[in-house]
Image (cartoon, helix red, strand yellow):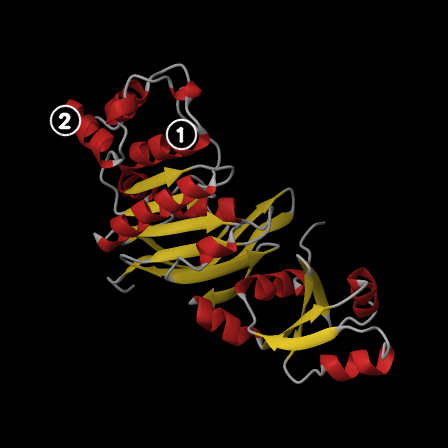
Amino acid sequence: MSAELAIDVRGLTKQFGGRKVVDDVAIQVKRGEICGFLGPNGSGKTTTIRMLCGLLEPDAGAGTCLGHDIRRDARRIKRRVGYMTQRFGLYEDLSIQENLDFVARAYGMPGRKQVVREALAQLGLEGRRDQLAGTLSGGWKQRLALAACMLHDPELLLLDEPTAGVDPSARRDFWQQIHALAAAGLTVLVSTHYMDEAERCHRLAYISYGRLLATGTAEEVIAAAGLQTWELRGPALADAVALLRQDPRWMAVPFGTAVHVSAARGADLPAWLTERAPQAGWSVHSIATGLEDVFISLTQHAQDNFG
């Protein structure tokens, strides 16, 4: 196992009720790297994260997290990892400061009052220290949850859809904090549904129906997909989408007042439309394939693991 890797696992598999919700997943994340973990709801992201931090034991697979064996050293891993769950998990009837003090007590941290003061300052929570957590907006709850994750000075942050339901300004502030932490040496694995957030990550891993379908930088993932994309504009675009969906080679997705159409490299959309709808009046021009185009394509072609 390389000392440069904070996460180095392979063959991770987990079943519930006879269904493989994670199936032979391998992930490597370098220290100080932000890795975006993407996939649709129910794809196995949360289960994978819980196996990495020692909350779930895999049915198969092996590897290390922060140099510790994920099977034998779960307790050691937990002490060095900060895990932020999808839902706010702190006490809503306690203040910000009381919540952080409670977490510090749970970790048995020496000098906890100073630790809490530093956390309040680092995350900009000093002015709201006495506010009840239950009265906070989504963005402030997110900031409190991150502060709680950071109290014990972890080496790895596992963030499970941390910006769901948070407004764009709070999301931007959150990502500025994450990049500052990574620049200081912290490793981050963050699951997200937002493509703009995926583009902020150093590397990506995409999972669907429990199987890992793509890894690499955003540029590498797009290149490996082997897609070309066009933008279609004109009248009656709903008719265009209906026509395109008659042929499985085309992936047509409405984007505002246009339609994005992707297919494997070598396909000729303009010629196909000219042959089938010569009088439709649609304009077609090539555009760069984006991450969203790639991920929609990957999901559509993935094999369902239900049943």
Residue 282 placement, left or right of 105: right
On the question of residue 270 being in view, the answer is yes
The number of discs equals 2
Residue 81 placement, left or right of 38: left
Quick one: SS at disc 2? Answer: helix
On the question of residue 61 being in view, the answer is no
User: Residue 247's quadrant in the figure?
Assistant: bottom right
Q: Circle 2 sits on which residue?
A: 114
Q: Residues within 10 Å of mark 1 (few under 14, many from 20)?
A: many
Instruction: Provide residue 235's location: percent of width, then percent of height.
Output: 79, 65
Relative to residue 34, is residue 285 depicted above or below?
Answer: below
Quick one: SS at disc 1? Answer: helix
In depth, the one of 288 and 67 nearer the eye is 288
> Which residue is pictured at 57% across the width and 61% down the height?
292
Q: Circle 1 sits on which residue?
A: 141
> Which residue is pictured at 52% across the width and 59% down the height?
206
Q: Disc 1 versus disc 2: distance between alpha carbons?
A: 21 Å
> Which residue is pictured at 60% across the width and 65% down the height?
293
Residue 237 placement, left or right of 94: right
The amino acid pointed to by label 1 is Lys
Instruction: Provide residue 89's location: percent of width, then percent of height.
Output: 43, 28
> Which residue is pictured at 37% across the width and 17% down the height?
132
Instruction: Provide residue 140's location: percent of width, then percent of height.
Output: 38, 30
User: Residue 55's quadrant in the figure?
Assistant: top left
The amino acid pointed to by label 2 is Gln
User: Residue 269's quadrant in the figure?
Assistant: bottom right
Relative to residue 266, is residue 182 depicted above or below?
Answer: above
Q: Could you tell which of marks 1 and 2 lies nearer the N-terminus?
A: 2
Q: Which residue, as the protein is rendered here, is positioned at the far top?
A: 93
